[in-house]
Amino acid sequence: QVQLVESGGGLVQAGGSLRLACTASGSIFSRYTMAWYRQAPGKQRELVASITVSGSTNYTVSVKGRFTISRDNAQNTLYLQMNSLKPEDTAVYYCNANRWNGFNRSNYWGQGTQVTVSL
């Protein structure tokens, strides 16, 4: 079992920056692939960025070069540094943890944190 709590969302003007954090508890954090998803009004939830146990990262094209995902296993915390924010980045951002043990997929979600980017 993994419990995830996001923080760091808020209001920011276009071109500004925010850093989201997701703190995990309840299991061994270092064993999970972590990811950030987002969902804008009227849109489907999309994968923004992911980071594997070994530290390999992937980003959706629209945020590549602007966002950086990282993890601090000692602090059981996932981060998303968001720079050069655009109004199109406005969404609820969700932290996700998942793990495949060869037989079963474990998947957990945080409550979400609102990011609003104004003109």
Image (cartoon, helix red, strand yellow):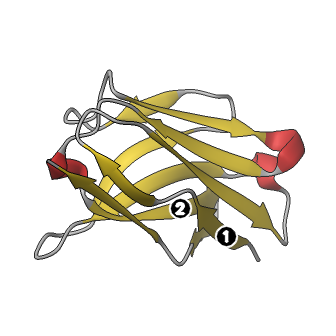
Q: Residue at x 33, y 27 (%)?
A: 66
Q: Residue at x 34, y 36 (%)?
A: 16
Label 2 crowd (10 A; few <14 / some 14-19 / many >=20): many
Which residue is pictured at 85% across the width and 47% down the height? 75
Q: Pointer 1: what residue? A: 4
Up/down of 84 relative to 104, above or below: above
**Which residue, given by chain and number where applicable, does mark 2 sit on?**
95
Do the residues under discs 1 and 2 have CB atoms within 8 angstroms?
A: yes
Tell me the amino acid under the disc marked 1.
Leu
Camera sees residue 101 = no
Residue 3 visible (yes or no): yes
SS label for mark 2: strand
The circle on residue 71 is none
The kind of residue on which mark 2 rests is: Cys
What is the x, y in percent for residue 63? 27, 34
Q: Mark 1: which secondary structure?
A: strand
The correct choice, above or below, for 66 with respect to 85 in the image is above
Tell me if 11 is positioned left or right of 105 in this view.
Answer: left
Horizontal and vertical percent position of residue 76: 80, 51
Q: Position of residue 69 (x, y in %)?
A: 52, 36
> How many marks can you see?
2
Using residue 26 as the reference point, say whether residue 69 is left or right of it. Answer: left
Q: Quadrant of residue 44?
A: bottom left
Question: Is residue 86 toward the left or the right of residue 6 in the image?
Answer: left
Q: Residue furthest right?
A: 74
Between disc 1 and disc 2, whose residue precedes?
A: 1
Q: Residue at x 25, y 52 (%)?
A: 117
- Name the residue nearer the viewer: 95 or 98: 95
Q: Nearer the viewer, residue 14 or 1?
A: 14
